[in-house]
Image: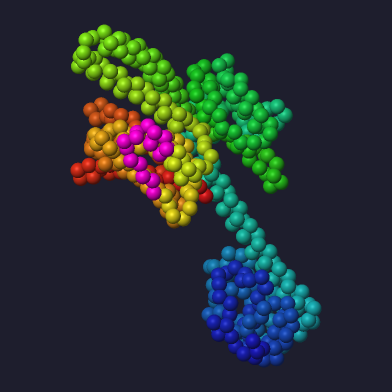
């Protein structure tokens, strides 16, 4: 900018009352002339200098404003207004006075400005006095930003603390030490869960363990803490009143800026009801898979004896007993399959569907010589998936399609398609009489006392697909035929 050119509002840096940019800015509110030109040359070596006589520019952003006596008389009220209303941090104003300054009272001027400099003034003195004011401005701005950041940090910490205090699960923070990890924080839910109103701050959480707490689980926790690693376990704990409860305990290290472990955070969830259900299911599964099978083998043996002792064709009673025996034996086998594919923690390696389906069809060709099986695979090469129990589900679908088909020569089509979004579709279509509507309704709406499935095959497929977040759908043709649609994620 030319030293003798007045800047309009558009020429001045826009912004709020805080310093703009990295380079300090000085506003010369002076008429064009020799003094202003000299100031532009002197201050321009160190600052971004703007010149103006437009009152509106006093509302823009700068780090120091310098007036001559003439312009100061004109805008003193505006300066005072800005100082009184909007400044978040210190903003210096300087008045230059000389022999031509007339009747300007330096004493009165001090209520509007932060320094009064008499002209002429040495260059070094001018730069020093202006520099001190600008530095004070910049320092004040930095302090204000730090205070604002501190306030934001405090509010953030308060929010996080409230979230922890009011969380629906138990939360604790411990401080690692030699041998112990004493509590330094416990939220309300932890106190409600354990019954310890004070949270036992200062003690190691081992006070929750008792006589029946599994030693191996204790050792797992201790080993993870000693090695500064995360750990999740189901542990039997004791409340303050001695009541036992199952606790899903998850512990994770909290690292400091240097990568060391500063604290551990623990999460506690009461899973007693879940554990009871798991134990109940274990017992029922054992009874169904072992005891029932043994008893049905006995019935099957005596039924065979009845058949062989009779003359001619067996009675309809014997036939019905044999039919019921086979169905109950199949039910027990289905429960075992479901238990195998639904076990927690199970994993599988990637499999190629083309190879596995070829093996499956080969086995079914031998088992069902009158049935026809057709497989359609993607044209762009082999498809790999890693879904626990997937082939068990496909085998169940194909087997049911054959065994529940009243056609003497049933046919089953298996079509595989790889989608662009990384999913694999498997459609299994038969030409049988179709799955009863009640079975499909139960699958979509759940079991009720009045509406329940007679077979577990569809549930087995549903659980396998649902476990990986896939899709399972059943559609039946207008007269005959059923298509089971399975969608699972492909291997990345």
Q: Is residue 440 visible to the viewer in this orientation of the structure?
A: no
Residue 254, x across and y down, in percent? 63, 40
Colour basis = rainbow
Q: Is residue 93 covered in magenta? A: no
Magenta residues (range): 360-376
Q: Is residue 293 shown left or right of residue 67?
A: left
- Using the image, determine if residue 109 lies above or below residue 32: above
Quarter where residue 144 is shown:
bottom right
In the foreground, 289 or 135:
289
Residue 197, x across and y down, in percent? 53, 26
Residue 121, x across and y down, in percent? 77, 82
Q: Is residue 368 covered in magenta? A: yes
Residue sitting at x 56%, y 75%: 14
Residue sitting at x 66%, y 70%: 22
Q: Is residue 359 visible to the viewer in this orientation of the structure?
A: yes
Residue sitting at x 49%, y 18%: 243
């Amino acid at each position: 900018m030319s030293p003798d050119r007045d800047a309009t509002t558009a020429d001045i840096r826009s912004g709020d009352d805080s310093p703009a940019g990295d380079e300090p800015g000085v506003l010369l509110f002076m008429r064009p002339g020799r003094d202003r030109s000299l100031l532009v040359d002197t201050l321009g070596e160190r600052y971004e200098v703007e010149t103006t006589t437009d009152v509106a520019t006093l509302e823009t952003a700068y780090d120091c404003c310098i007036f001559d006596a003439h312009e100061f008389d004109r805008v003193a009220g505006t300066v005072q207004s800005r100082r009184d209303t909007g400044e978040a941090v210190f903003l210096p104003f300087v008045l230059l006075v000389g022999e031509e300054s007339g009747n300007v009272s330096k004493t009165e001027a001090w209520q509007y400005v932060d320094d009064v400099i008499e002209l002429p003034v040495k260059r070094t003195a001018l730069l020093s006095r202006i520099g001190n004011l600008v530095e004070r401005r910049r320092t004040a701005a930095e302090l204000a930003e730090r205070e604002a950041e501190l306030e934001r940090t405090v509010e953030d910490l308060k929010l996080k603390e409230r979230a922890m205090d009011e969380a629906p699960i138990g939360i604790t923070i411990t401080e690692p030490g030699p041998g112990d990890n004493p509590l330094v924080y416990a939220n309300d839910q932890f106190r409600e869960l354990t019954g310890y109103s004070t949270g036992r701050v200062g003690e190691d959480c081992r006070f929750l363990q008792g006589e029946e707490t599994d030693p191996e689980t204790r050792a797992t926790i201790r080993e993870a803490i000693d090695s500064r690693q995360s750990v999740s376990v189901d542990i039997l704990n004791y409340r303050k009143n001695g009541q036992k409860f199952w606790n899903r305990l998850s512990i994770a290290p909290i690292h400091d800026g240097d990568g060391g472990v500063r604290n551990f955070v623990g999460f506690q969830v009461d899973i007693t009801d879940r554990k009871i259900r798991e134990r109940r299911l274990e017992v029922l599964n054992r009874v169904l898979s072992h005891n029932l099978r043994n008893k049905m083998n006995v019935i099957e043996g005596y039924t065979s004896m009845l058949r062989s002792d009779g003359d001619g064709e067996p009675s309809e009673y014997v036939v019905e007993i044999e039919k019921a025996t086979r169905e109950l034996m199949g039910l027990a086998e289905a429960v075992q399959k479901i238990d195998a594919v639904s076990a927690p923690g199970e994993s599988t390696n990637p499999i190629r569907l083309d190879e596995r389906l070829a093996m499956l069809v080969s086995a079914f060709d031998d088992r069902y010589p009158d049935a026809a099986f057709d497989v359609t695979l993607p044209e762009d090469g082999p498809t790999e998936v890693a879904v626990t129990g997937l082939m068990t589900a496909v085998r169940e679908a194909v087997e049911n399609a054959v065994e529940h088909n009243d056609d003497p020569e049933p046919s089953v089509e298996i079509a595989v398609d790889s989608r662009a979004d990384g999913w694999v579709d498997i459609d299994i279509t038969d030409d049988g009489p179709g799955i009863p509507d009640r079975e499909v309704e139960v699958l979509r709406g759940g079991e009720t006392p009045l509406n329940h499935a007679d077979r577990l095959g569809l549930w087995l497929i549903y659980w396998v697909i649902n476990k990986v977040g896939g899709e399972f759908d059943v559609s039946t043709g207008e007269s005959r035929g059923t298509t089971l649609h399975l969608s699972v994620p492909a291997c990345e």
